Image (cartoon, rainbow, N blue to C red):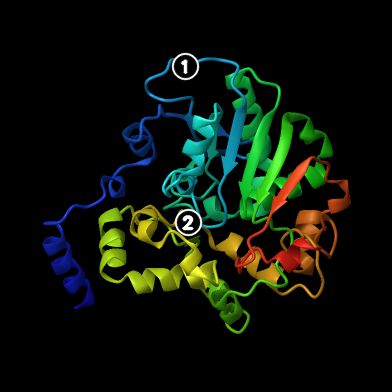
Amino acid sequence: MFLQLLMLYASVSALKEEDPDVHRNFMQVCVAHGYQAQSYQVTTADGYILTLFRIPGKTDEPITSGKPVAFLQHGLLDLSDTWIMNEPAPGFILADAGFDVWFGNSRGSFHSLGHVKYNPWIHSDYWDFTWQHMAEYDIPAVIPFVLNQTGQKKLTYVGHSQGTLQMFAHLAEDPSFMKYINIFIALAPVGTVRYLDIDFFNLLKRIPYFDTLDALGIHSFLQNANAPGINYVFCDVLPDVCDGVAQALSDSKVSEDNTERFPVILSHEPGGTSVFNMMHWQQMTNYLFSKMEKYDYGSVGNLYHYGSIFPPTYDISKIPGPIALFFGIYDRLADPKDGDW
């Protein structure tokens, strides 16, 4: 009945103007706003095929070499679209400032569901990853690729949330990788989430939600349904509900956000990830002290994967700079108290 009401509203609302960005894909949004757009595919050492997008400049200017390069990596359950959907859009701001702007898409997200061996909708093995595998395989695949394409020796890495976590983890295990980075700009940086205050995760401490999904053979989580019109109508007819979703998952003060743009933004969300990755995040919320640690498979699984009954921890003292950390005082996922660690 509720879906029928939504569809009825959709037919009525069609009489009024709908933002065309709702139905545009990443590259179409860029072109519609006056920017050139390109896409590339990169294969990681463990076989995942990742899609990168690029804005080399505006549509009315020739492509020139030698521009400084910025690489933007989205956060948990997100995708590259997050950087170009708001107004103003960070991706477009950087392009206007003269950067050659590149956008990553994590394995398992809407734009990066390829693999040399596995079909994500047939083979459950595709979903056997967490952010630690993004750190181990995705980061060293995409950054050198971008530098090779642009002819630059270094780039500026801008990570958000999980996008910071995977770079922190990679640098902790390979500090020399910083030779490719001018500066690491960490937005809502995450290393530990002991002070995370999100109702959804708090509830998960009391129920084995992700374990149940895994046992039922459900291995992907919040995959993009590729139905932007439905999301747009839902947020248009029930804006308070959309505000509530954003508040529950990230902010404690939605009034500080660009709520008028929520219908467009959420029509492209979420990006999706693996249930396994969410299980890793859930483990992180249960740590008794601040640490960055690989996935805990249990003593037997840890012996098989790590050669120890305990999962390895990342030594953050090995992470080199320069790094610029930016926290939001109303951010409920990347709490500034966790940043103090």
Element class at badge 1? loop
Residue 109 visible within the image: yes
111 relative to 58, above or below: below
Q: Nearer the viewer, residue 71 or 303?
A: 71
Is residue 340 toward the left or the right of residue 72 in the image?
Answer: right
Provide residue 281's location: percent of width, then percent of height. 64, 65
Q: Quadrant of the N terminus?
A: bottom left
Is residue 304 toward the left or the right of residue 141 in the image?
Answer: right
Q: The residue under label 2 is which amino acid type?
A: Gly
* Image quadrant in which you'd find residue 285: bottom right
19 relative to 175, above or below: below
The answer for how far apart the CA atoms under marks 2 and 1 are is 33 Å
Residue that lies at the very extreme toward the right in this rendered image: 317
Q: Mark 1 sits on what residue?
A: 63
Label 2 or label 1, whichever lies nearer to me, is 1
Provide residue 186's location: percent of width, then percent of height. 68, 48
- Mark closer to the chain start, 2 or 1: 1
Q: The residue under label 1 is which amino acid type?
A: Ile
- Residue at the image position 60 percent from the left and 16 percent from the top: 66
Q: Mark 2 sits on what residue?
A: 272
- Residue at the image position 66 percent from the left and 71 percent from the top: 196
